[in-house]
Amino acid sequence: MIAFWVVAGVLSAACAGVILSSSARAAKRAGAADPTTALYRRQLREIDDLADRGLIPETERTTTHAEAARRLLAAAEAQGPAWSADTAVRKPILVVAALTPLLALAAYVGVGAPGLLDQPFKSRIATWRDADPASLAPPEMAVVLQTLIKERGGDVEAYGYLAQAEMASENPAGAARALRRAIELEPKRADLWEGLGEVLMIEAEGEITPQVERAFQEALRLDPTSVNARFHLGRARIAAGDQKEGLAAWRALAADLPAADPRRAAVQSAIAQAQGQPAPAAGPALGGQLGAVQGMVASLAARLEEDPDDPEGWVRLVRSYAVLGDQANRDAALAKARTKYAANPDVLKALDLAAKTEPMR
């Protein structure tokens, strides 16, 4: 580990040397004319060259040429003062650049663990593979599954387990990749398409994107009884402005579900909310992946309780509660965050926007 820091210090010193050398060369040119106009003239020549070679269309040539010419005229009219270098600050900058790597090494020796042995990733993977799977954290399980699939080849079930591990690791993009690979192996599995739609929707923070809609449409084509696909496609129609058709799809779905099915209450609650009426008890949220989402949100909330100095984390938490339709926790998290960042208008604006996110159901 000490060797690593020595090498890092040497590289830092080398980088500082390159920067200082470039600065010294620039200082020799102090007082020279502003190079901006020359840059825009060269840009005009490059635009003409690309158009003459047929690499950009003539219409684009006209617009880009006009924009570059406008910038050239603005730069020519600006006539800013010539740049000059202050030689008095060179020595302090050189001292700081030389001392920074040494101070970093001293800080590491003082508060770090220079005697700690290296932990190569391969050895950690081997340890995780030998351990009880129940003792592994979700990211560790995901790595083990990826390694096994790479070594032995993966079947549909292996990729399904990997998707679950990636979701539990707060990595919906990884879960989507695993499900796409599973679909390549068995493209006629409606449950895989439905799972992909849910994961992509989670990745999009509850929005029904074209990719999400396509996945649900494919799931519904393969299985016309798919509850989650029918529900979210109805929500997509409402979001697109066709409330009449979306509500009709939801009412048909509610009529097809048995009275004892808790998902029926969730659909009826969504219908009432869409019509601006008081919502009855909603029951469990629709969507097979929502349990994983709720786990991710709970993990984020716990982390912010321990380390609350994370404005982006608070914005994510408020948005996540809004997506889940959990208004009580959304408002509580929003109140805490607004109190903590009362002096930061940018964070307050982001929090308010996150709180207005449409719920997933």
Image (cartoon, helix red, strand yellow):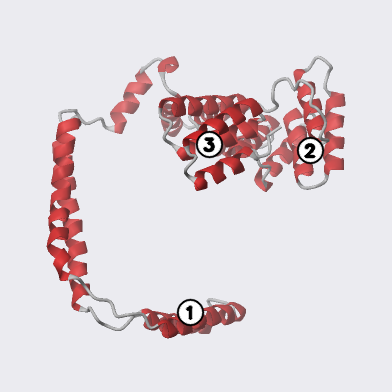
Q: Name the amino acid type tagged 3.
A: Arg
Would you name the residue on which mark 2 appears?
234
Task: Provide the secondary structure element on which disc 1 rests.
Answer: helix
Who comes first in sequence, dot 1 or dot 2? 1
Q: Quadrant of the C terminus?
A: top right
Q: Is residue 32 left or right of residue 135?
A: left
Of badges 1 and 2, nearer the viewer stands 1
Of badges 3 and 1, nearer the viewer stands 3
Task: Provide the secondary structure element on which disc 2 rests.
Answer: helix
- Residue 166 point in image, percent of width and height: 50, 31
Report the front residue among 244 and 45.
244
Q: In the picture shown, does residue 105 fall above or below 142?
A: below
Tell me the distance, in whole angstroms, between the alpha carbons under discs 1 and 2. Answer: 49 Å
Q: Is residue 287 left or right of residue 179?
A: right
Q: Name the amino acid type tagged 2.
A: Gly
Residue occupying the point 71% across, 38% down: 216
Tag 1–tag 2 contact (CB < 8 Å): no
Would you name the residue on which mark 1 appears?
71
Report the front residue among 106 and 5.
106
Residue occupying the point 77% across, 34% down: 230
Question: Which circle marks residue 338 in the picture?
Answer: 3
Using the rendered view, name the quadrant where residue 132 is placed.
Answer: top left
Check disc 3: other Cα within 10 Å, few if <14, some if 14-19, many if 20+: many
Report the front residue among 306 and 267.
306
Q: Name the amino acid type tagged 1.
A: Arg
Tell me the distance, in whole angstroms, between the alpha carbons under discs 3 and 2. Answer: 35 Å
Task: Provide the secondary structure element on which disc 3 rests.
Answer: helix
- Residue 93 point in image, percent of width and height: 17, 59
